[in-house]
Structures are given as structure tokens and as C-alpha cells.
Amino acid sequence: MNVEILRMESLRIEARAEHEGSRKAIVDGVDLLLHRGEVLGLIGESGAGKSTIGLATLGYTRPGCSITGGKILFEGVDLRRLSPDQRRRLRGRRIAYVGVSRTETGEFLSSDDVELIITLANYVGIAIENANLMQSLQSKVVENERLKEFSENIVESINVGVLAVDLDDRVES
């Protein structure tokens, strides 16, 4: 099953111009799609907007920047329409961003480093899925308890309301 997890449509991020007081688009018209089980890497030159786009997946921007256009859909919900508190509850529990750069010595990551990062991302994904399943199970337990109580109330009211009548229309006990 190819479940859509993240979709960006026509993302636009603007920054304040330092000496003009106006705003300038630093990311404009970005579209991307990520399905469950996929790993997405953004590659580009320094300053191309990779980290800016990555942070936008969480609804974040750097100081002086703002998301001014487009949609950021996580599991079908537009993150731009959520309150800051609702976004905060998602971050780190349901959605996360891992920024990767050069090593401290300025070297690019080795294939072993990349493999380790992908493995860690997969484990994080599994942990998030397990948390989602646990939350779903907990809500089903609550729902099951309510249904059980409702059923018991129905049975009790049926027991209270049943009368036995003989052929002569006399109530039997």
C-alpha cells in the first residue's frame, strides 16, 4: 500500500530584505511527495534552500522568514492551518526533520554515514508507527469499554422489563 505521508504544493518562503524593508522569495514553487517507507534527500548547493524546505515540513522558519504560500500536507492535514500548539504536538512524535551536512572537518558524509542515517530514520519511523498504533489501540479500548457498559445497560433494562403472561393473561413470576 502506497500511503502518502507528506506533500508540499507550490511552497513559497519569503525573507525580509535587510536594507530595503521588503520581502524576497527564497523558496518558490517547491512541490514534493513522500510515501510511507520512503526516504527523501534534498541535494543542492549551499544556500539553495534545502534546510529551509526541511524546516518548513515542520511548520518552522528561520528568524526573518515566513511561509507565504503553498500547502504542507502531513497525512492529509495542512500544517499551515494548524495552531502552533497543534503543530507542537506533532513535532518529534509524528514528524521530524534530520538535517545532515558535512563532517566537522569539512568532508562529505561517507556511504557508511548515509547508511547509518537511513537506518536511524527507519527506526524513528518504526517508533512513530508503534506510537500511532498504541494510541489507536488505547482509543479502541476506551471505545470497547463504553460499548460494553452500553450493552450491559441494555441487558439490565431488558431484564427489568420482561414479564411472563400465561394463556389466561395472568402475569407469572
Image: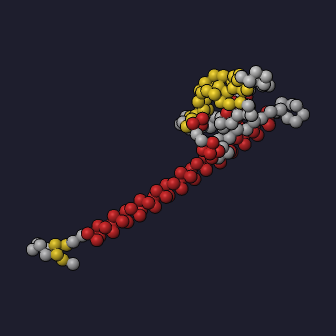
- The quarter of the image holding the C terminus is bottom left
- Against 121, residue 70 (above or below) is above
Q: Nearer the viewer, residue 154 or 37?
A: 154
Q: Nearer the viewer, residue 77 or 156?
A: 77
- Residue 160 is situated, as x and y percent measured from the top left of the image, at 28, 71
Q: Nearer the viewer, residue 62 or 96?
A: 62
- Residue 172 is situated, as x and y percent measured from the top left of the image, at 18, 77
Judge whether residue 146 can be spotted in this image: yes
Total residue callouts: 0
> Residue 69 is drawn in which quadrant?
top right
- Residue 10 is situated, as x and y percent measured from the top left of the image, at 61, 24
Residue visible at 9% across and 74% down?
168
Residue visible at 24% across and 70% down?
162
> Residue 159 is drawn in which quadrant?
bottom left
Q: Residue furthest right?
A: 105
Residue visible at 26% across and 69% down?
161
> Residue 101 is drawn in which quadrant?
top right
Q: How is the image coloured?
A: secondary structure
Query: 106 left or right of 8?
Result: right
Judge whether residue 54 can be spotted in this image: no
- Residue 53 is situated, as x and y percent measured from the top left of the image, at 69, 30
Q: Residue furthest left?
A: 168
